[in-house]
Amino acid sequence: MTQKILVLPGDGIGPEITAQASRVLAACQARGLDVEVEEALVGGSAYDAHGEPLPAATLEKARGADAILLGAVGGPKWDTIEDLAKRPEKGLLGLRKNLGLFGNLRPAILYPQLADASSLKPEVVSGLDIMIVRELTGGIYFGQPRGIEERDGERVGFNTYVYAESEIERIGRVAFEMARKRHKKLCSVDKANVLEVTILWREVMERLAPEYPDVELSHLYVDNAAMQLVRAPKQFDVIVTGNMFGDILSDAAAMLTGSIGMLPSASLNESGQGMYEPCHGSAPDIAGQNVANPLATILSVAMMLRYSLNEPVLAERIEAAVGRVLDDGLRTADIASAGTRTVSTTEMGDAVLAAF
Amino acid sequence: MTQKILVLPGDGIGPEITAQASRVLAACQARGLDVEVEEALVGGSAYDAHGEPLPAATLEKARGADAILLGAVGGPKWDTIEDLAKRPEKGLLGLRKNLGLFGNLRPAILYPQLADASSLKPEVVSGLDIMIVRELTGGIYFGQPRGIEERDGERVGFNTYVYAESEIERIGRVAFEMARKRHKKLCSVDKANVLEVTILWREVMERLAPEYPDVELSHLYVDNAAMQLVRAPKQFDVIVTGNMFGDILSDAAAMLTGSIGMLPSASLNESGQGMYEPCHGSAPDIAGQNVANPLATILSVAMMLRYSLNEPVLAERIEAAVGRVLDDGLRTADIASAGTRTVSTTEMGDAVLAAF
Ligand SMILES: CC(C)[C@H](C(=O)O)[C@@H](O)C(=O)O
Ligand SMILES: CC(C)[C@H](C(=O)O)[C@@H](O)C(=O)O
């Protein structure tokens, strides 16, 4: 049966990088992948065209898709929109929430070819391979009540950090299963010495543990986790945490590799439908210059093939092609170093296709 | 007039490290510092003695003190106390809240003698000198409502992230003033693309900016700030942020230096009363072994002399003494490296006193 893929280029460098990823998708089709590919608007570009960061038509197409490939959203152009609900980011958050994409997988992998790019000492990060499992549809991102209001003669801003047991349990299971497929170590990150919501988080993780006796569960407070990521990141295998802490820690972890332009991510719902996107942002400063790194987006296609389309062989082929291109010394500007050849976005796409 | 200092050794290595700091305080008295020093219990040790992490007698002494020197609180021994209000951490949080110690100053400084200790490449961190200004008596740490309760047949945990304009303004002023005394760059960290409370935060920072035209104000989202700290920490001068983000970022920043055992901190209220403590924790694993690093606590005495007791000359003398001891190659185990001499907690205290 033909599966449906929706490509959402988004803003900034989004259209350039998804264009290269779409070429790779087309190459997969040529090798027998049975998919139908559509495009739609999201984020600032959707706001410009329709006054909404997540137009109803886009959401409808997203619901009907088996998998979504997203570029990136946002940029200074839209940072002054008064109504927070109309900002590009809300397009992304709306997709996550409406599709129930609660399970966010963010790998932080150091490519041996790019070891120099890290700001950390080689011995601290060589061989780094962490998987961060971030809860994506709950926590303080979506908690009610929220807002800014007048109290006792001054304005007060407030948000609510909230998790129900069932939400914690389902992301916990994703993380335990992930650890099971990897090195069987799961570290749950919370602030249970201060926040009640994370006391419940820790309790639920502990309750799940006996069901996964092969997985070693540990806990860290979020401040300590941030420290340990900087100090000795290779101690981690899988990390599971809530939406806000996951946002912070996954970006820190990605940056340990020094090549955030290389890192894909997946956001999955209960039926295996997924949205795939690079970990990096929309980089408005270099948009339209054909210099952005398309590899994280191309590797997001590989994740899509693995997690949503059940095509592990094609996924590996893409990953191998990227590896070969790096071995050949080709680099976009963000990962360039002495002795390598700097190429454009489209040239990088060409090279991956040639190696595929 | 004689000023009063309260020493709160706390738990774990707390008593050992404050003992060395107290010797330095005594040396200051010998050089004319007019202070009266008392001790009291806080944290787990207070719980063991009185069933409360912050006994009324301790709080009363704290209120009457001009400055407080705290070791550290907490340890696995008390992690199983069911009632969160009785845990050692609540002693610390209670002191902060009751004394109104809203302004937390956390320097992340790389000591040139310890450059090797960092997990980051030398060129990325050499000369690092960041001051993190963390709001300490508000935000999600203290927001109401909070708790765990039954809703729709399952338990739900919740906390409230809340700031009033006046709270943001007063920590903003501390940060702007600090930037003014340093390199005149202030970066405010928020998540204004998602959280209303931090939209208000950003607004208030912007409103203050014209009053400090000599300070350059910038803003970063917290995920990006975590990334930038790993990628290129030297871009920062002063960072200001809320309680939770400050907890995470200040620990990450401290760890960039590789020598968290060296970093002091100050927590100030509106009248200049302050609590001073090392950035590191109670390290229960090495407690009682006379191996802990007392330098962060000794340097906390220097901060106390500078910020609460108006004795900048004595403060500099302590800092210079610590510098000389490091120059001489003396190291506690946590900062030991090839070619240095590993000394005990008390030997390190001896050495600082000898150099003072
Ligand atoms: C753009 C923003 C809303 C988003 C988030 O905070 O989740 C981004 O930082 C991410 O991590 O995907
Ligand atoms: C012990 C804990 C409550 C405390 C905090 O989270 O503030 C500590 O981590 C700190 O940063 O001083």
Image (cartoon, coloured by chain):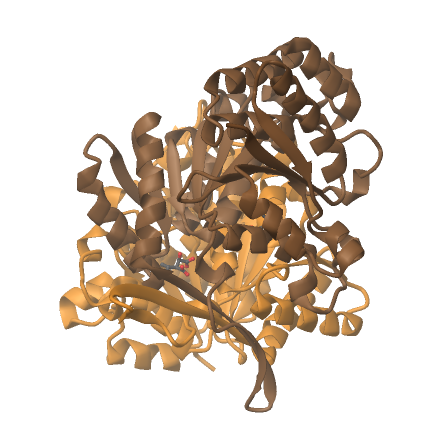
Chain colours: A brown, B orange
Q: Report x, y in % for residue B15.
A: 27, 56
Task: Tell me residue A87's x, y (percent).
Answer: 69, 59
Q: Quadrant of ligand 2?
A: bottom left
Q: Nearer the viewer, residue A59 or B232?
A: A59
Question: Residue at horizontal 49%, vertical 44%?
Answer: A249
The answer to whether residue A262 is seen in the rendering is no
Q: Residue at x 35, y 73 (%)?
A: B94
Q: Is residue B45 above or below residue B328?
A: below
Instruction: Decide if residue A320 is on the left or right side of residue A330.
Output: left
Q: Answer with the quarter of the image where residue B173 lies.
A: bottom right
Measuring from the top left, give residue B160's x and y in whole percent: 44, 70
Residue pushed farthest right?
A289
Q: Is residue B308 visible?
A: yes
Residue A198 place in picture, x, y as percent: 34, 58
**Residue sitting at x 47%, y 63%:** B31
Residue A38 to residue B79: above or below: above
Which residue corresponds to the image point at 68% horizontal and 16% vertical from the top-left?
A: A352
Q: Is residue A353 above or below residue A72?
A: above
Q: Residue furthest front?
A: A1
Please give left or right for residue B126 compared with residue A265 in the image.
Answer: right
